[in-house]
Amino acid sequence: MTPQFLFFCLAIVAITAALGMLIARSPVSSALWLILNLFCVAGLYLTMNAQFLAVVQVLVYAGAIMVLFLFVIMLLNVAALPSVRDIDWRLGVGFVLGVALLAQLSYAIASSTDLMPAEVSLESTVATGSVEVVAKELFTRFAMPLEMIGVLLLAATIGAVLLARRVSPK
Amino acid sequence: MEIPVDWYLALSAILFLLGVIGVLFRRNVIIILMSIELMLNAVNISLVALSQATGDVSGQILVFFVMSVAAAEAAVGLAIVIAIFRNKLSVDVNDFNLFKH
């Protein structure tokens, strides 16, 4: 199995899962499609030799964040939408905006690839994403942002608890 | 046998576009939040691809921070959704017109 074949398989499954998330009628199926997409992205990280990020992706995204989403969906007991929906003007406006954004991104990618060194390939930087390399950078050059992330997560936890708290009637 | 960086960037653009379409089309606020997660993931793919192509590990550190902020954003966003659902009994963004009146 060549790396290209692996990439194409993962990319096709990732795009299919993203489409499935968009067109699923039930929020629970949407969340499950997104979990499949996140696993494919973790596989793509592995093809780029970013092992640490692949593990963190599965743990944090597919593990923690999506479980949180599923909890909230089931807690709120949101009913699935009816399968037939009226197509209004929003669909046309959104389609035009989406195509414009895709054209913009394609142009940006097509016109900026010559900025990169052409001789550097993914194979030449095999050990870049290993745990040792990432940890060394994270705890030396990026130690201060790491501490800030800790403060941010604490603030987010307190904020989430305060926001979701039921206000008792006096 | 290596994979060109352009392929990763193209895949990243497509996934980002699908996230934008989700934010624009869907009216369930939870699915809008999930589309935002999809867009963050698309950007992460391009960050890792460019980090590998240039041999600089800083891009991967940035992806790590993006994941942390995404976790915080999901927690606070879902707490806000729960708080609004208590008042409105709905997750449809068309019903969220608190600032309109």
Image (spheres, coloured by chain):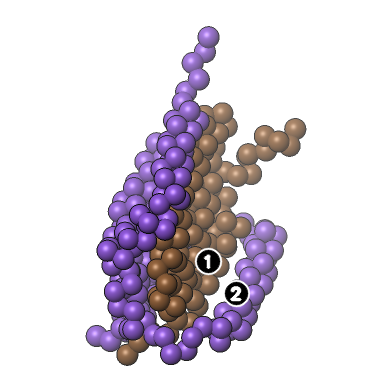
Determine the residue positioned at 37% across, 61% down. Answer: A137
Q: Position of residue B54 (x, y in %)?
A: 44, 78
Tag 2 near tag 1, CB within 8 Å: yes
Specify whether A137 is left or right of B24.
left
Q: Which residue is mark 1?
A: B16
In the rendered image of this protein, which colour is used for chain A?
Answer: purple
> Disc 1: which chain?
B
Determine the residue positioned at 63% across, 39% down. Answer: B96
Q: Position of residue A27 (x, y in %)?
A: 44, 50
Specify whether B65 is left or right of B13.
left
Q: Position of residue B55 (x, y in %)?
A: 40, 76
Q: Which residue is mark 2?
A: A105
Name the secondary structure under disc 1: helix
Q: Nearer the viewer, residue A85 or B67?
A: B67
Q: Nearer the viewer, residue A67 or A105?
A: A105
Q: Point out the residue furthest to the top here.
A: A170
> Disc 2: which chain?
A
Residue A68, located in which quarter of the rendered image?
Answer: top left
- For badge 1, the amino acid type reads Phe
